Amino acid sequence: MLGPVDYSLWLIGFLLEASVVVCALYRRDFLKYLSLCTYMLCAALVNCGQFLCIEKFGFSSRQYLYCYYYTESILTIIMFCVIIQLYQHVFIEMNVSRYIRGAGAALLLATAFFSYAVVRENKDHLTSRFVVELGQNLHFCGVVLTYLLWGAILKLRETRTRLIQLVLALGVYFSATAGVYALRNLFPGLQPSFLRWVPPVIGAWLPMAWAYTFYKVPEDARLTTARLLARAR
Amino acid sequence: MIIAALIFVFSIAAFLQFFIWHCRSILASSRRVELSDRVREVTGVQDGSFGAEDFGRLVQLVRLCPERGDDQGEIRAVGTYYSLLDFFGRVTRPAIPSVAAWAEQERVNCSYFAAVALDRRISYSRDLFTQQVADRL
């Protein structure tokens, strides 16, 4: 059964996701970051869908379990489009968009195949295991892709503050979510107590950080990445 | 199981790195801001070089000023980062002094960030006051 805290977290997440789109529209950056705004709109819709599913079938139902994991997986796939667009922003002057899209699609297929191959070994609980396994692997792929993107930003000495903050917030989100999925795989017993609260908090982090970036950081703001890596003297 | 464990370890390491870089990117925007004489006067730090322990006092001063409405989120985020660094510094001080020194330097940056936030709030308060006086006239 859900309590007031669950509903509050759900509402906060929904409002923050909507606020990213509002901030992007306000700053007239909606089309420039189309994938990102589409993802946030989809995330808000998924939030509503999950809420309706809980109301109809209950929090502990199998219907909600599958609805949750599969919509999360679909959102992660849409998120890959966001990463691809961020790659395109970073490599905008090198005209390699076609290759980036191809590589992104290939990686996505490889991840799905790898997840299937792993679960194929345990056919008894194929569906329930597959969704968690797929979620873990997709998010881990997201971590690797974001890490590579961050490497490219450093290598190319990218200075656009907004782009840097968008990528770093994405890195925090992906790594935290992949960690939680892995923890869920390792210790399923933690799910009802600790792990139940973590995903909504992480889910609220990304729209909060992105809304902040769109609202506070102007497009022409510049930042030296070396400053972020510099160690104390 | 092994794959999940590896993913967990890598993800936590990546999470810490991304989180630190993200906080530093917020802090970096304040480093270029020159502090006004008003802040130096209010805080009693004439040369503008704040210490790591000044953060709490500066945030208290920030809270005394009227809210601008757009800086609460970043002050809270930097406050979380400061607390994390404080804990990290205490834990690593006996074993890895270089990491503790890095955490100390980061906390100094957090203090400078709070001083910049205070400067903005003071300017905002003065603007409000000027506006009120002008309205009365």
Image (cartoon, rainbow, N blue to C red):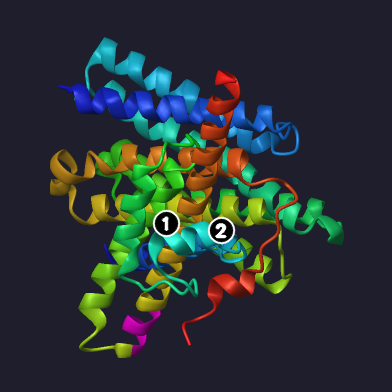
Q: CA distance from mark 2 to mark 1?
A: 9 Å
- The one of A154 and A108 positioned closer to us in this rendering: A154
Classify A13 as above or below B40.
above
* Residue under label 1: A175
Q: Is residue A47 magenta?
A: no
- Disc 1 residue crowd, few under 14, some 14–19, many 20+, Cα 10 Å: many
Q: Is residue A120 left or right of residue A29?
A: left
* Residue under label 2: A146
Tell me which amino acid carries mark 1: Ser
Q: Is residue A97 left or right of residue A56?
A: right
Q: Residue at x 55, y 70 (%)?
A: A228
Q: Residue at x 53, y 26 (%)?
A: B132
Question: Magenta region: which residues?
Answer: B98-102
Element at badge 2?
helix
- The one of A205 and B52 positioned closer to us in this rendering: B52
Instruction: Please tell me if label 2 and label 1 are on a single chain.
Output: yes
Tell me whether circle 2 and circle 1 mark residues in contact (CB < 8 Å).
yes
Q: Is residue A200 left or right of residue B68?
A: left
Element at badge 1?
helix
- Answer with mark 2 or mark 1, whichever residue precedes in sequence: 2
